[in-house]
Amino acid sequence: MTEERRSVLFVAGEASGDLHASKVVSRLRELDPTLAVFGVGGDRMRDAGCELIYHSDDFAVVGLVEVVRHIPRLKRAMERLVALAAERETRLAVLVDYPGFNLMLAERLQRMGVRVLYYISPQVWAWGEGRVRKIAARVDRMAVVLPFEVDFYRDRGLEVEFVGHPLLEEPELKAETVTSPPSGPVLGLLPGSRRHEVERHLPPMLGAVEVLRERIDGLTVRMARAHGISDELLAANGDPERLGVEVLGPSRTHEVMRGSTALLIASGTATLEAACLGVPMVIVYRLATLSYLAGRALVRIPHIGLVNVVAGGSVVPELVQGEASAQRMAEEVGRLLSDSSLRAEMSGRLLEVRRRLGEPGASDRVARMVMEMLGGAE
């Protein structure tokens, strides 16, 4: 293979990884237009110039029980990626989050002499330290997006750099976009971006709406429908429009956030987006029962919401599993909708979380790490 056609394998198995990795790919194409990028990602990575071997929609599986059904297909995908890396004489892989798959892939790649840069750390600080030894043995460098992760990994012998959180690069999440509260009570619903999240979160969220409409005069309710979530799925899980909920289509999540007095929001990266906008929220999450029981036995931190994890304490309420009922959701978010001083206090603490996420420019920093590891940094 000629030096002019160096290749990099990217693997981003979920929608958020696709978003963040696509910006790195775009920056890499600017730094070296001859670089060949291939692997797993979504529409954004494809548009940025990545040759998709697999689409991330086929990889987005969450929960220990849910993953089991997909193991044979994921193993076949891994074999093909390894074979292509060998065929193309790939020298470097950038693995983005998605640890269940990516850490196994990293082991295979290391045996072949492929260097591994891990972008967006597996949350081993939540799940205990058993995976840290695997990471140290399989990963050459880490680019982390949460500030406390630097000391965690460095203390365990890994080469790590805090690059800042890529969310800060989003135009709609820049500092000047911090939300001004709407004039009337507006509840925003964000049940999640995956089918199983909608199935588990939307029915109790809509139940909470019914309770709140009896308690709060003039309540407006809006919902953001994620990419890949069909109208049929919404209709089968409570039919929000039947309850007078305005459903906004894909790409309008930030519009729902900015226009809400308070949010009911599924745990995940979206909670950090809402924090960047200073929008008060209640975090909810439900899993299959066996997945929840298995996870509860492993988790080593007191919070599941990234907002609270970054803050190092309880900034927003969390309702998990049985607590994520319609009645409890209505109680917690009802307090926010009705108490302006409580909202103001929470908003201030959320903006402090934003400050902890670093400075914009994560994608450029990661791209330059890639070029350095390839031996071609500018």
Image: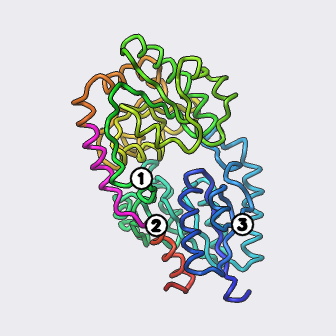
Give the magenta-colored segment's residue range: 346-361
Type of amino acid at the residue the image marks with label 3: Glu
Name the residue that disc number 3 marks: 51
Name the residue that disc number 1 marks: 125
Q: Residue at x 55, y 34 (%)?
A: 248
Name the residue that disc number 2 marks: 143
Q: Residue at the bottom extreme?
A: 2
Type of amino acid at the residue the image marks with label 1: Trp
Instruction: Count neighbours of disc 3 (C-alpha within 10 A) and say few if under 14, some if 14 to 19, many if 20 or more.
Output: some
Type of amino acid at the residue the image marks with label 2: Ala
Question: Of helix, strand and loop, which one carries label 1?
Answer: helix
Q: Residue at the top extreme?
A: 214
Which residue is at the front of the view, 371 or 75? Answer: 371
Which residue is at the front of the view, 285 or 339? Answer: 339
Q: Is residue 118 left or right of residue 299?
A: right
Q: Position of residue 65 (x, y in %)?
A: 64, 38
Label 2 to label 1: alpha-carbon separation: 15 Å
Q: Earlier in the sequence, mark 3 or mark 2?
A: 3
Q: Is residue 32 left or right of residue 84?
A: left
Q: Residue at x 41, y 32 (%)?
A: 263
Which residue is at the front of the view, 257 or 374? Answer: 257
Which picture quadrant has residue 45?
A: bottom right
Q: Residue at x 56, y 56 (%)?
A: 19
As drawn, 297 above or below 128: above
Q: Is residue 34 left or right of residue 342?
A: right
Q: Residue at x 60, y 42 (%)?
A: 62
The nearer-to-camera label among 2 and 1 is 2
Which residue is at the front of the view, 269 or 49? Answer: 49
As drawn, 331 above or below 67: above
